[in-house]
C-alpha cells in the first residue's frame, strides 16, 4: 500500500489545535441551556482542568523545542514556534468564552436558583463581615504565611498551580512623595476549603465566598507595620513534563521521586492575573517569572475555575443535577456468583459504566481467596485512592499465591500514587514490576492461573479502561472475561515479556504494541481496500480517544479513495481532515461529549461481510503504537459481537450529544430537525437496566429510544 500520496501536510490538522477544539466542545456543554445548571458548572470546571494539563505538558513541550532551536515541522507542516503562536491566540479566545459563560450565564442562574456567590468583599453585609472576622481569626490566619521581597529576601518560589495574593506594601511612617513600595505574596492555602459558607439570609438563599477573596479582604492583618497599597490574586502554570533518562537511572522509582519534586519548580509558561491588576504589581510578576505578554491571561472573575467541581458537590441542589447514575448489575453473575464457573460457560462482556465494575473487582477478590488459584498477574496504570483491587492483590500474596503486578510509574500525574501502591504491594509479598525500559505499559490485562480437575486453566480479563473502580463509574469502557486457551497462552506470554526478556515469535489472538499493532491495523485497512476494489462490502467503523498517527490516517485516506465507507468516533484529538476531494470524501468523523467520558476503543472491519472486531487500550497515536505496551483483543463470541455492533450502531446514530467534524475543521452539533432524538449514553443506561431485570429481553427487540422531534 503506497501511502506517500496521502501524507501531504495540507491533509492533516495540527494535534494541539485539534485538542483545543475538543476543549471547546466540552465548553459548549457548559453553554448548553438544555443541560441542568450544576452539570454545566461541572463541564466548565472540566475545561479549566483540561487547559491546565494541556499547558503543563503540551505547551511546555513545545516551549522546550523552541528553546532547543528545534524547527522540524509536525505532520501538518507547523513548526513549534508557529504552533505556540496559534495556541496562544486560540487559548486566549477559549478563556474569554469560559469567563463570559461563567459571568453572564452561570452566575445569574446560580443566584436565581438560591446560590449566591459573593464576588467581592465589598459586597459583604455587616452580619457576614462579623462572621468572617471570627472565621478568619480561627481558621485562616494561623495557616497563612506572608512572604516579602527585599534586598535580604529574594523573590519566593511560587508553586505550580497554586493560587496566590500578590501585594504592594509600604511602611506606615513613610512621607508622602517618598513612598518605597515593596512586594509581598501570600499563598492561598490549598489545605482549606476554597468555598466558604456565609450565614443564610431570611430569604433562604445560600451565600458563599471564595477563600482568596477573604484572604485579600484581611491581608492588612498580615503586615501590621505596613499599609497595603494594592492586592490582587495571581496563578502560574509551570512546565510539568517529566524528563527521565531511564538508561542512566539506576533505580527508576527513586529517579521518578526526584523528578516529581522538580515538577513544582519548572519554567513558568502561563500567568493568570485579575484583569484589574495594578500595573506596578504586574511588572514585578512579569519580570520575576520571565514571561511574555502573550503568556499573561487577564481574568474577569475567579482564577482557576476548577473550584466549580466543589460547587457541584454542594448539598441541596440535586434538582439542578442529572439523576445519580447507579450502574446495573451484570446479569451473567446474578444467578451464578461463582465467577470462574460462569466464565467456563462462555465469554462475558462488560459495558461500563452502564454495567457495574464489581465483577472485575470480584474476579480478583475471588481469586485471592480461592485455594485452587495458583497465581494472579495484572497490569496497573491508574487506580483509585482506596483501591479494592490493590487490597485484593495484597491479600492474595498474604494467602501464599504467586502475585505479579506491573505498576506503571510513568502514568502522568499518577506517579506519586503509583509509587505508594508499588511499595505497599511489595510489602505484602507481591512481585512488583516497573515496566519495560523506554516504554509505558498502558495495556489492561489480568491473568488468573487456576488448578482444576482437568488441569491448569487460565482466566483472563481484558479491558479498554483502567483498573479504577472510581473512574469506572464515569468513563465508558468495555471489558471481556474469558478462559479461551489461546488468549490465556498469549496472556502468559505478555507477562513473561514484561517481567523478563521472553518475547514469543508469534501470538495466537492478542495484538501487541509496539511489536505488531501498527502493521496489523494497516493490514486490516488494506484488506478493506482490496475488498472495495473487488466490489465486496467494505467499511471501517472505529471508536477511540485520539487519532493523530500519520500512517494510519494516510491508510484511511487510501481506503476512502478506494470507496471504503469509514465512520470514526474520535472523542478528542483528530488530525484527519474530512471532505478533501478525492481523498477523504468517504470519511465521516464525530465526537460525543456527554455525561460520561467516552473512553472505550473499538475497531470494526467489514471483512467482506464477516465482521472483525477488536477492542483494547490503544488509540491510533504514535505513542500508543510505537512507545507503549498496548493490547487489542478480538471479539469472537457471536452474541458479544452482535452486542458490540449494536453499541456502534447506537453511537453512530446519536443525535443529541454528537458533534460532527466539518471540512473546515470546525465541529457542529447534529441538526435535530425532523430526526429521532437519540442520546447514546442515555440509551445504554436504559438497556443495561432492562438487561439486568429478571426476565430476559428478546435480543432482537432492541430499538432506538424514540422521542418527539424538536420544533423547527
Image (spheres, rainbow, N blue to C red):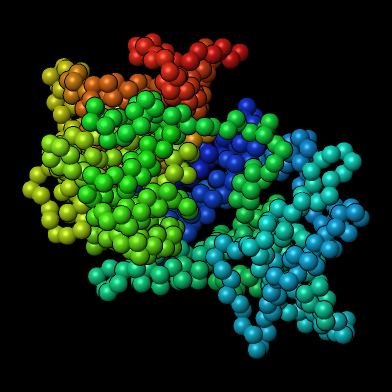
In the image: residue 435, left or right of residue 167: left
Residue 400, visible in the rendered structure: yes
Kindly indicate the quadrant of the structure image that contains residue 62.
Answer: bottom left
Image spot of residue 399 (x, y percent): 31, 54
Quadrant assignment, res 98: top right
Residue at the spot x=68%, y=84% of the render?
Answer: 150
Left or right of 448? Residue 666 is right
Left/right placement of residue 184 relative to residue 418 reads right
Q: Position of residue 100 (x, y in %)?
A: 67, 43
Quadrant holding the N terminus: top left
| Residue 571 visible (yes or no) | no
Q: Residue at x 72, y 38 (%)?
A: 316
Between 310 and 300, the one lying in front of the other is: 310
Q: Quadrant of the C terminus?
A: top right
Question: At 63% across and 63% down in the image, what residue appears?
Answer: 191
From the top left corner, tell me how far across and down residue 29 is, in percent: 57, 35
Q: Is residue 423 above or below residue 112?
A: below
Looking at the image, how many numbered discs can be counted on the residues? 0
Is 187 drawn above or below residue 309 in the view shown? Answer: below
Q: What residue occupies the far bottom of the structure in this picture?
A: 152
Amino acid at each position: 500500500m503506497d501511502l506517500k500520496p496521502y501524507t501531504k501536510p495540507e491533509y492533516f490538522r495540527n494535534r494541539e489545535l485539534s485538542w483545543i477544539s475538543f476543549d471547546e466542545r466540552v465548553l459548549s456543554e457548559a453553554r448548553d441551556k438544555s443541560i441542568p445548571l450544576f452539570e454545566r458548572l461541572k463541564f466548565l470546571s472540566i475545561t479549566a482542568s483540561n487547559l491546565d494539563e494541556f499547558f503543563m505538558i503540551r505547551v511546555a513541550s513545545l516551549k522546550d523545542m523552541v528553546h532547543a532551536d528545534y524547527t522540524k515541522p509536525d505532520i501538518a507542516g507547523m513548526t513549534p514556534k508557529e504552533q505556540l503562536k496559534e495556541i496562544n491566540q486560540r487559548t486566549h479566545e477559549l478563556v474569554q468564552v469560559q469567563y463570559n459563560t461563567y459571568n453572564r450565564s452561570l452566575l445569574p442562574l446560580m443566584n436565581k436558583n438560591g446560590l449566591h456567590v459573593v464576588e467581592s468583599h465589598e459586597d459583604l453585609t455587616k452580619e457576614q463581615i462579623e462572621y468572617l472576622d471570627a472565621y478568619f481569626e480561627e481558621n485562616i490566619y494561623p495557616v497563612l504565611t506572608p512572604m516579602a521581597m527585599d534586598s535580604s529576601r529574594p523573590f519566593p518560589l511560587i508553586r505550580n498551580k497554586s493560587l496566590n495574593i500578590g501585594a504592594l506594601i509600604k511602611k506606615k511612617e513613610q512621607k508622602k512623595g517618598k513612598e518605597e513600595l515593596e512586594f509581598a505574596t501570600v499563598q492561598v492555602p490549598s489545605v482549606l476549603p476554597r468555598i466558604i459558607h456565609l450565614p443564610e439570609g431570611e430569604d433562604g438563599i445560600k451565600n458563599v465566598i471564595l477563600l482568596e477573596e477573604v484572604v485579600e479582604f484581611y491581608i492588612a492583618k498580615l503586615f501590621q507595620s505596613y499599609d497595603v497599597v494594592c492586592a490582587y490574586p495571581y496563578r502560574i502554570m509551570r512546565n510539568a513534563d517529566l524528563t527521565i533518562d531511564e538508561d542512566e537511572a539506576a533505580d527508576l522509582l527513586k529517579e521518578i521521586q526526584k523528578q516529581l519534586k522538580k515538577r513544582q519548580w519548572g519554567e513558568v509558561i502561563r500567568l493568570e492575573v485579575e484583569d484589574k491588576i495594578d500595573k506596578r504589581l504586574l511588572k514585578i510578576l512579569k519580570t520575576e517569572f520571565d514571561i511574555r505578554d502573550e503568556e499573561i491571561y487577564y481574568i474577569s472573575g475567579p482564577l482557576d475555575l476548577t473550584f466549580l467541581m466543589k460547587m457541584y458537590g454542594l448539598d441541596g441542589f440535586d434538582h439542578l443535577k442529572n439523576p445519580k447514575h447507579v450502574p446495573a448489575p451484570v446479569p451473567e453473575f446474578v444467578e451464578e456468583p461463582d465467577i470462574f464457573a460462569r466464565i467456563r460457560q462462555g465469554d462475558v462482556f462488560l459495558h461500563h459504566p452502564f454495567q457495574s465494575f464489581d465483577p472485575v473487582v470480584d474476579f480478583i477478590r475471588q481469586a485471592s481467596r480461592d485455594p485452587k488459584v495458583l497465581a494472579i498477574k495484572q497490569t496497573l496504570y491508574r487506580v483509585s485512592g482506596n483501591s479494592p483491587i490493590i487490597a485484593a492483590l495484597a491479600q492474595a500474596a498474604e494467602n501464599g499465591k504467586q502475585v505479579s503486578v506491573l505498576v506503571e510509574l510513568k502514568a502522568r500525574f499518577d506517579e506519586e500514587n503509583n509509587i505508594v501502591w508499588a511499595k505497599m504491594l511489595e510489602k505484602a509479598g507481591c512481585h512488583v514490576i516497573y515496566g519495560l525500559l523506554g516504554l509505558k505499559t498502558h495495556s489492561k490485562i489480568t491473568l488468573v492461573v487456576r488448578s482444576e480437575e482437568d488441569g491448569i486453566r487460565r482466566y483472563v480479563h481484558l479491558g479498554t479502561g483502567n483498573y479504577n473502580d472510581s473512574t469506572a463509574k464515569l468513563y465508558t469502557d468495555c471489558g471481556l472475561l474469558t478462559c479461551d486457551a489461546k488468549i490465556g497462552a498469549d496472556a502468559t506470554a505478555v507477562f513473561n515479556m514484561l517481567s523478563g526478556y521472553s518475547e514469543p515469535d508469534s501470538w495466537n489472538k492478542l495484538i501487541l504494541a509496539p511489536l505488531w499493532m501498527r502493521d496489523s491495523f494497516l493490514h486490516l485497512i488494506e484488506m478493506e481496500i482490496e475488498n472495495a476494489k473487488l466490489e465486496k462490502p467494505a467499511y471501517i467503523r472505529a471508536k477511540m480517544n485520539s487519532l493523530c498517527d500519520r500512517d494510519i490516517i494516510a491508510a484511511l485516506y487510501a481506503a476512502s479513495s478506494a470507496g471504503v465507507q469509514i465512520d470514526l468516533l474520535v472523542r478528542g484529538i483528530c488530525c484527519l481532515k474530512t471532505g478533501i476531494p478525492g481523498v477523504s470524501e468517504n470519511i465521516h468523523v464525530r465526537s460525543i461529549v456527554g455525561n460520561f467520558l467516552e473512553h472505550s476503543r473499538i475497531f470494526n472491519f467489514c471483512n467482506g461481510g464477516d465482521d472483525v472486531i477488536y477492542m483494547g487500550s490503544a488509540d491510533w497515536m504514535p505513542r500508543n503504537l510505537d512507545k507503549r505496551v498496548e493490547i487489542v483483543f478480538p471479539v469472537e463470541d457471536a452474541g458479544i459481537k452482535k452486542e458490540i455492533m449494536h453499541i456502534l450502531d447506537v453511537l453512530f446514530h446519536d443525535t443529541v450529544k454528537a458533534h460532527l467534524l466539518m471540512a473546515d475543521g470546525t465541529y457542529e452539533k447534529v441538526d435535530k430537525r425532523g430526526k429521532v432524538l437519540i442520546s447514546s449514553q442515555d440509551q445504554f443506561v436504559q438497556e443495561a437496566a432492562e438487561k439486568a431485570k429478571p426476565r430476559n429481553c428478546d435480543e432482537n427487540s432492541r430499538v432506538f429510544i424514540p422521542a418527539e422531534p424538536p420544533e423547527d
